[in-house]
Amino acid sequence: MISSAYAATAGPAPSSGLPQFDSSVFASQMFWTVVSFLILMYLLRRYVMPAINDILDSRGKKISEDLQHAEKARHEAERLLAGYREQVERARQMTATTLEEARIEASAIRDHALEELTEELAKKRTAALEEIERARVNAMAEVREAAVEIAMLATEKLIAESVGRAKADEMVHAALGHLEQNKANLH
Amino acid sequence: MTLLLTTVAVHAESAKAVAAAAPRMDPLHHFQVVNYIKISPFGLDLSISNSVIWMWISVAAVFFFFWYAFRRPELVPGRLQSVAEAGYLFIRGIVDENIGSGGKPYFPMVFTLFFFVLFCNWTGLIPGSFTATSQLIVTATLALGIFFLSIFLGFYKHGLKFLGFFVPSGLPVLLLPLMVPIEIISFLARPVSLSVRLFANMTAGHTVLGVLFFFAATLPWVGSWLPFGFSVVFTAVEIFIGFIQAYIFTILTCVYINDSLHLHH
């Protein structure tokens, strides 16, 4: 390129046409163009391109390695997640089972307790009924004895020796039989 | 009468002197190749010129940029390394996209080509520098190299079948005498269009910049800000054009190599 000062200087009269068509400088420029180009190509191939290729290759390798690592980590994470899911599921199932078992057990205990209670109540009732029966029988026997004695005393007093022991028993039996007949009214 | 003639002559003389002293616009001057060191072994002219010097500066700039960016390559790249990697991947994308399978061996060549052209375009924008890619012979050398490479590859990979490249498939036989010469001409035009496109873009852009700078330097201050402002904008445009032209050059190179490798038309 031309500098402004250079452009303004008065030079020799220009030759006709463009200076580029002046064939006297062709040979040297052709030669040096070829030489310069080949030297540049040699320098770039020798010193520059291997460095660029190396760095690009190692970067590519690094990236693909990183990708592989990431993929591996993803698989690992997926595996862990699946494991945790399974654990949670198992825990949930265990909880459900435990709950169910507890429910069954509780219901068994309740049934058992109810049964026992019923049984005991029934036993107590039977015992009470027996007790009552026994008391009644006793009472009956006592009443009978008391009645016999009363009747004996009364008879002794009333008739003194007129009625013998046998006759009195008979009479008491008769009276008791009467009593038995009206047992229902005694209670 | 003699007096009158003398007066006219004196006036013409002074006008000529004024014209000679005034600044003269010569926007093509900076395309002039100047040989600094003359080397001519065996009658070959291998002189070192300003064009060659700036070509070397561009080569050195490309190499040192990449060398510096990758002096300690990191897995997590720094800024400069990111830029260098982006450039590398950009070219790899172009190669993959345009050549596809079997494009790998040509990557170093395409990579070098892109950055060689790009940096030649860009170093040319430094004031006082020289734009090697504004030289038709430089771009033509590159283009011819690619052209011959594509021909060589075509015959190397496909033998004489490569000639089928000039016969478009699916055409009636009657049209072939018309189409085959057209195909051959368009094939031969490839290096021409490739080299002229780059050279013309660079030349045109720098010529416009030269004109703008001339006006910016010679106009009185009331007028000079306008060409100066334009020159600033146009320099930015030139940076963009420098990239675009390097990109186009590279893409077309890939397309030509692909044609030779795969032959589908």
Image (cartoon, coloured by chain):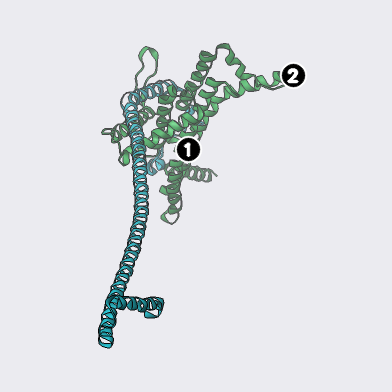
Chain colours: A cyan, B green
Seen in the picture, residue B121 relative to A137 is either above or below; the reply is: above
Whichever of labels 2 and 1 marks the residue nearer the N terminus, that label is 2
Kindly identify the residue that appears in the image at 46 percent across and 29 percent down.
B95
Task: Please identify the quarter of the rendering in which residue A49 is found.
Answer: top left
Q: Callout 1: residue from which chain?
A: B
Q: Position of residue B74 (x, y in %)?
A: 28, 36
What residue is shown with label 2? B174
Residue A95: x %, y % from top left: 34, 52
Q: Nearer the viewer, mark 2 or mark 1?
A: 2
Instruction: Give the answer, above or below, for where B183 lies relative to B234.
Output: above
Residue A151 in view (yes/no): yes
Kind of residue at badge 2: Leu
Residue A159's spot in the image, x, y percent? 28, 86
Report the front residue among B244 and B57. Answer: B244
Secondary structure under badge 2? helix
Quarter where residue A148 is shown: bottom left
Task: Tell me the kind of residue under disc 1.
Answer: Ile
Q: Circle 1 sits on which residue?
A: B244
Quadrant (top left/top right/bottom left/bottom right) for the C terminus of chain A: bottom left
Sort mark 1 into few (<14), some (14-19) or many (20+) by Cα contacts within 10 Å: some
Residue lying farthest bottom? A158
**Residue with the most extreme right position:** B174
Q: Cα distance, mark 2 to mark 1?
A: 41 Å
